[in-house]
Image (tube, rainbow, N blue to C red):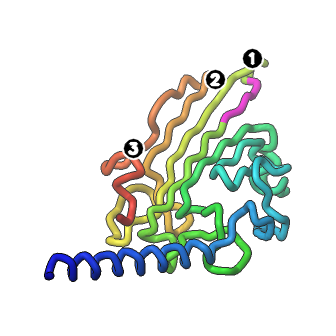
């Protein structure tokens, strides 16, 4: 009798959990719904947009200024290539809070402790003093500062820290790691779970 009563309670608990979970997920709007907007009011579509963002896949691939909608301040880097990748905590591919925008640090009051991360891989070419073409590349990993306040690297944008920087330049001979967090460069250890 006890076993069958436990089985009934367990089954009810599982069904309630499934119902709550499906209700929570059913309330989220996805890119495929066609109603989500970018921060400048454009409808988000699947695949790459005109600027190089693929919000569904969490990737940007284009020119540096395209990431900033060709802003005037970035024109000095307009010919440089940029690839960005991020996780759901940085910028989700759905809206679960009902504001028609992709969620940022969903479920957290700020990015701090959210486990958000972003990578930037930039590269370009320039002519050195002798007119010879040189190539450079820069790679950086940025993560949300842990909730416990552990110092993991140089703070950037108030809620984030750099955990790895790599720079290579054929013209200057610079090559390799500029910075590596003493806590490592993997994203997993900064996850909130």
Image height of 50 relative to 30, above or below: above
Tag in front: 1 or 3? 3
Image height of 171 relative to 191, above or below: above
Left or right relative to 176: residue 103: right
Mark positioned earlier in the residue sequence (2 or 3): 2
Left or right relative to 3: residue 130: right
Q: What residue sits 78% from the left and 18% below the top? A: 131
Q: What residue sits 75% from the left and 38% below the top? A: 80
Q: To which residue does mark 3 refer?
A: 180
Left or right relative to 25: residue 32: right
Looking at the rendered structure, the secondary structure element under dot 3 is: strand
Q: Are marks 2 and 1 in contact (CB under 8 Å)?
A: yes
Q: Position of residue 148 (x, y in %)?
A: 32, 71
Tell me which corner region of the image, top left, top right, bottom left or bottom right, holds residue 11. Answer: bottom left
Alpha carbon distance from label 1 to label 3:
31 Å
Q: To which residue does mark 2 refer?
A: 171
Mark 1 neighbour class, 10 Å CA radius: few under 14, some 14 to 19, many 20 or more: few
Q: What residue sits 80% from the left and 65% below the top? A: 34
Q: 175 or 131, which is in the foreground?
A: 175
Image height of 25 relative to 181, above or below: below
Which SS does the magenta portion mostly show?
A: strand
Image height of 124 relative to 92, above or below: above
Mark 3 neighbour class, 10 Å CA radius: few under 14, some 14 to 19, many 20 or more: some
Mark positioned earlier in the residue sequence (1 or 3): 1
Mark positioned earlier in the residue sequence (2 or 1): 1
Q: To which residue does mark 1 refer?
A: 132
Q: Position of residue 5 (x, y in %)?
A: 21, 82
Tag in front: 2 or 3? 3
Q: Are marks 1 and 3 in contact (CB under 8 Å)?
A: no
């Amino acid at each position: 009798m006890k076993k069958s009563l436990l089985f009934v309670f367990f089954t009810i608990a599982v069904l309630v959990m499934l119902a709550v979970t499906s209700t929570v997920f059913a309330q989220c709007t996805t890119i495929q719904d066609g109603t989500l907007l970018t921060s400048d009011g454009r409808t988000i579509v699947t695949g790459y947009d005109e600027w190089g963002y693929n919000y569904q896949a969490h990737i940007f691939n284009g020119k540096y200024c395209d990431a900033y909608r060709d802003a005037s301040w970035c024109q000095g880097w307009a010919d440089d290539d940029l690839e960005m990748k991020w996780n759901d905590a940085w910028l989700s591919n759905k809206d679960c809070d009902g504001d028609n925008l992709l969620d940022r640090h969903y479920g957290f009051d700020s990015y701090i402790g959210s486990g958000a991360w972003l990578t930037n891989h930039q590269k370009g070419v320039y002519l050195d003093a002798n007119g010879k073409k040189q190539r450079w590349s820069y790679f950086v990993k940025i993560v949300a500062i842990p909730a416990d306040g552990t110092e993991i690297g140089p703070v950037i944008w108030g809620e984030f820290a750099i955990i790895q920087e790599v720079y290579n330049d054929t013209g200057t001979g610079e090559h390799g790691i500029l910075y590596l967090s003493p806590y490592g460069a993997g994203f997993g250890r900064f996850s909130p779970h």
